[in-house]
Amino acid sequence: MPPRRAMSVKSAVVPFEPAAPPAPLSRLVHHDVLERWRAADRSAHAPHIVAVPRGDGEDWAAAALVTARPHTAYLKIVDAVGDVPRAVEAVVSHARHRGLAQVKWEGWTVGPGAATAAGFVPLSAPRTPAEEAGGPRTGYVRRLHDGAVTEPPYYGQTTHFTCGAVTALVAQAHAGRLPRESLDRRAELTLWRDATNFPACEPVGLGVAVRRAWPSSPVTVFLDADRPVLLDQYPADEQEWRAVLQRASRAEAGRVGVPIDSHRLSMTAIRSALGRGEQVLLLVSLAGMQGFDVPHWVLCHGVVPGAVVIEDPWTNTAAGDTWVDAHLLPVPDLSLDTMSTISPDGFRGAVIIGPA
């Protein structure tokens, strides 16, 4: 659906304080909805209320709870209450004013008819097992730019350590080399077992595992570090045997024909790869988006003006973060450049998968 022209909606933006919501909001929102808003600690995602005042200015005709991951280019409507169309247009105007790429809407209290009427399109339901998925069953997105980014399936990792395997599986499903219905825990753990450096997947091992699983897929590893990586948190004796495994992965890369490029992969090069129809598995730190410096794999699969669109297989449920945040997630180039500079050495690791 092409972007719609936003209506001019007068609105107010105020922080959301769970313990002391504004009086106009308390009169507008249903108790059950307000309790769900309070159930998570959303403080890291800048929760705020976008409200539409009534004519007298003393009360609100509509309001929406809005959040977003830091250092990203979207807003998420958790719920809209009151005059819902006016609340949603106020959020869209707010997002446009900030130069953002999209607005998402969690499907807790909105159905497809109302979402479509507001200019949103449905997101494909996640492939994650129901007991693992969390969040709403449905979600919607309204793009605020021209052009379209094709939608991969969303699958959330079911362990703390299988992000690399999941990003590779989602990339191959997106490319049509893997049936979407085969995205499941068995596939996740099987590919992780072949790629792991116990428990993480380092770039070379992940690239080799992808090539072994899909021999027709061109794979290139980018790693601007000439030593074993992702080992600094381990004691010396545990670093040693993991380093042996990484050296073995490098030798295996030579045997199966996976090139290892030691140049630093730039944001321009990532955009160029995506423009050629390639997909980029990128190693990032979660410090910017989630507040803790943990290495993590995401899939870069599309671009919009000023941002790269990623799939993140991990969500922080305790912060109110759901698959709606992590799916089709636009991240500004500068933010992604910072996230993918991995401490302590400042290296960058990536695996690029080309068309067959």
Image (spheres, rainbow, N blue to C red):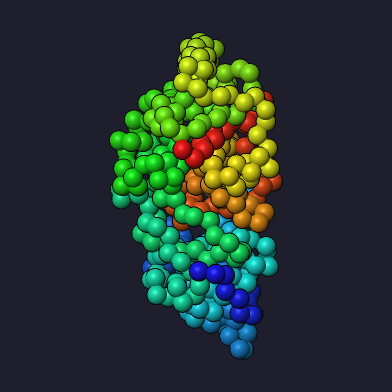
In this view, 322 is above or below 230: below
State the image quarter where residue 46 is shown: bottom right
Q: Is residue 71 left or right of residue 235?
A: right
- Between residue 230 and residue 320, name the one nearer to us: 230
- Between residue 210 and residue 244, name the one nearer to us: 210
In this view, 107 is above or below 172: below
In this view, 297 is above or below 78: above
State the image quarter where residue 113 is shown: bottom left
Q: Position of residue 323 (x, y in %)?
A: 44, 52
Whether residue 27 is visible = no
Question: Which residue is rendered at x = 35% and y = 32% of the image?
Answer: 189
Whether residue 241 is visible = yes
Q: Position of residue 274 (x, y in %)?
A: 58, 45
Question: Which residue is rendered at x = 45% and y = 72% of the image?
Answer: 115
- Between residue 26 and residue 1, name the one nearer to us: 1
Q: Is residue 224 left or right of residue 112?
A: right
Question: Which residue is rendered at x = 54% and y = 75% of the image?
Answer: 87
- Between residue 225 and residue 250, name the one nearer to us: 250
Question: Which residue is rendered at x = 61% and y = 60% of the image?
Answer: 101
Q: Position of residue 222 (x, y in %)?
A: 60, 29
Q: Position of residue 168 (x, y in %)?
A: 45, 37
How many numbered circles does the render carry?
Answer: 0
Q: Residue furthest bottom?
A: 56
Q: Is residue 171 left or right of residue 51?
A: left
